[in-house]
Structure formats: C-alpha cells, structure tokens
Amino acid sequence: ETGIRNLQETMMMFLHRHVASSSPARLKQMCSMFKKNKQSFALFSCLDLTRVDSASRCIHGELPHTPNSDNMVNFGKSFATSTGTPLFFGNMQHSLNSYSSIFKLSTAVSKRSYVTRAHPRPKPTHHVKHAVGMVLEAAQERRHKREARWERNLSKRMNIAESTSNVESSGSTEEKQDPDAAAISTSDTSYRGAEETVEIVVQTGLDPRKPNQTLRGSVPLPHGIGKKIRVAVFTSSDEAQKEALNAGATLVGGDDLIDGIKNATTSITDFDRAIASEEMVSKLGKIARILGPRGLMPNPKLGTVTSQDDLKFGVKRQMSGLVNYRVDKTGNIHAPIGKTNFEPEQILDNLRVFMNEIVDKKPDGSKGTYLKQVYITATQGKSVKMDLKIVDPGSATFMMDLEEDVA
C-alpha cells in the first residue's frame, strides 16, 4: 500500500508539472512509458485530478479548449493511438470505474482541503443577535455540565469531608461533625454557580507603535458589566475622604494609604480601581511600580485623576459599570460587556454603546481600514465572528433587524 501511495503521489506531481505544457515529443515518450507499464497507467488514471477531467470534457465539447487543455487532449489521443486504449471515456469517474475493473484497483476518491495555518478555512460570520444567542446558549450548557459534575462528585466530597472531620476530632469525646454540613461548608459554590464574562474583541487597523495611532479610554455601559467594582481613593482632604466613603469607596486615605501599599500592610487585591486627587499624583510615584503593572495607576486619560470636589462623582462613575479599554500591540481591543446571566437585549445595548465609543474616539493618525473584524466570546467559550456591517456604526445597517428573528 505504501508503494502504491508513493506512486500515486509521483504521478500526480508528474501530471501537474509536465503534461499540461509538454511538447509533442515528450508526449510520445510518456505514451511509450505507459504502454510498457500498464500498472503505472492504472494508478495514474485513478487520480481525481481537475485537469484530467477538464480535458475529458473538452473532448466532448462540454468546455472550451485552451492551450493547456489542448495538450491534455493530444496526450489522450496519442495514448489511445499507441496503446489501443482510450484515456478518457466522457468523464473522470467513468474512467476510474473502467480501469478499476480491468486492473482491480480501488477507486475510492476523496477530496482533501489541505488547510494550513497560513491559509486557514474562513470563519463564518453571524448576525449580531444570533452571535450573542450562540455565546449565551453555549455558556448555559457549560453551566449545566458543571452542575451535573457537582452532583456526581457529591458523595466523594462528603467522604473526604467526613474523613477530615474524623481526623480533627480523634482522641476527643466531642460530637463528630455532620457529614452533610461538612460537605456544604467545604463546597465550592463559585465553581458551579460561576457566571462567565462576555467579552468583545475588535480588530482594528491601528499600529500603536506609530504616532497618533494609540487608542485608550473608558466608557460607561448602560447595564454595567455585572461585577461590583471596589474603588480606592487617594486624597489628602478629610472632607473628600468622607464624601468618597459615602459614595461607596472601599478604601480612602492619603499618605497613610500609600505607605500601607508600599509596606504591604494594605493588599492591592482589596480594590479594582484607584482614583486620586490632583495633589496626590506626585506622591503616587512611590507605588507606581506596584500599581502600574496591574492597571491600577490613576490616569487623567481614564478620568481617574480629578479634583477633590469631583471625587465622589468619580467614585460613582467607576462603580456604575465603567469599562476601560486600550489597543494592544497587535491592534486589538478587548473589553467586557456583561455577564452570561444578562439578557440578550442588555448585551446588545452595551455592545452598541461600546462600538459607538470606539468609532467616536478614532485616532487622527488612523490609516486604511479602521474596523476589520469583531468577535464576541465568553470566558470559557469559543469566539463567534459577527457581521461587520451590523456592528460598524459607520454602516447604514448598524444594529438593524434586532427585533426580528434571525436564522
């Protein structure tokens, strides 16, 4: 079988390289070779090649003749003259069946795509409403699987909890812990009840390495992102600190808060965003290497550096579902637009506001195509490519047909 396969590959290369552009003398030499070795001819005829089939159809007038097809036709006629066996019988499949019955060889023909990483199969595009539905439906299926896995492993967790409680209470007369209560107390409810984050990925034509092609900002979403934001406020005013606490800030302080973060007495995992008043910006340099890599450093471009009077409004704005975005070095923008427990209409509203923000803040140095592709995905799911005509605010069909059922 290996020899036959190698011979088939050799004959395929031979056909593509020589037959279509061979001279008459070369065609006669090929015919004589096939006359001496009919086995090779049988393997050659079992190849499902478009050029051979096209030449066969040219003979019967189904396709117009071209220089390449004429050479193939001449080759077929020369072969028929020298061997007494016609090369083409009207179509390629009929030829395969005929020569298979003569030489008893298999004629299983399978078309192969030969998709490579350099030329991948194009990803299908979906209407924005259909794409959101696919992402939410897949997330719901994963949630059901996690719950089923949780129920299957319930007895195993109870046994582990019971053995742990027995070890802790060994050598004492105290009452043992109830296995059910132990299992519930050690249960990881965040696993089975976890809500994935719905994210949008926008591929742009920006190159942030070039001047005037950087994009960074923040936008408040109408329905938020489904996550409670913890805000830390850096200010030296006692009155501003009280107002920030009343507005919902988690941590407030001035030099004492900076020293606490620097000395690791205050964990940076206790807050998700940081806001600073203008007089505190110069003092934040002490902890810039701690806040910077985690994206917590206050920045005027993101609206996290304000005056003392506007701190309470800044806290409310950060907690209302403000999303920070920036273009990465490959020209892509990643941003959350909700959770999988959101309604599809809420996801669509957040997506509409976010896309309008991206187009409104288009850099002046942008050249060529600004928006190339837009994908939507969940934390643990596959990405779904959306129709650019529907999600591009510059298109006449932007967010159309959302009320209708999209197939």
Image (cartoon, rainbow, N blue to C red):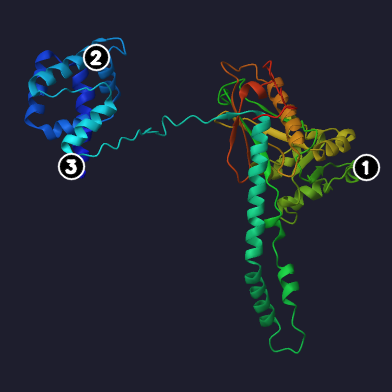
Query: In whole angstroms, how far apart are the C-alphas of marks 1 and 2?
Result: 94 Å
Quadrant position of residue 297: top right
Element class at badge 1: helix
Q: Position of residue 116 (x, y in %)?
A: 39, 34
The amino acid marked with disc number 2 is: Ile
The amino acid marked with disc number 3 is: Gly
Q: Is residue 60 above or below residue 47?
A: above
Q: Which mark is residue 112?
A: none
Quadrant position of residue 382: top right
Q: Position of residue 71 (x, y in %)?
A: 20, 14
Image depth: mark 1 or mark 2 in front = 2
Q: Are marks 1 and 3 in contact (CB under 8 Å)?
A: no
Element class at badge 3: helix
Q: Earlier in the sequence, mark 1 or mark 2?
A: 2
Task: Note whether residue 20 is visible.
Answer: yes
Residue identifier under label 3 = 3
Residue identifier under label 2 = 59
Give neighbour class at mark 2: few <14, some 14-19, many 20+ (Cα, 10 Å): many
Q: Measuring 69% from the left and 78% from the top, which residue is drawn there?
A: 165
Q: Measuring 81% from the left and 42% from the top, which residue is drawn there?
A: 234
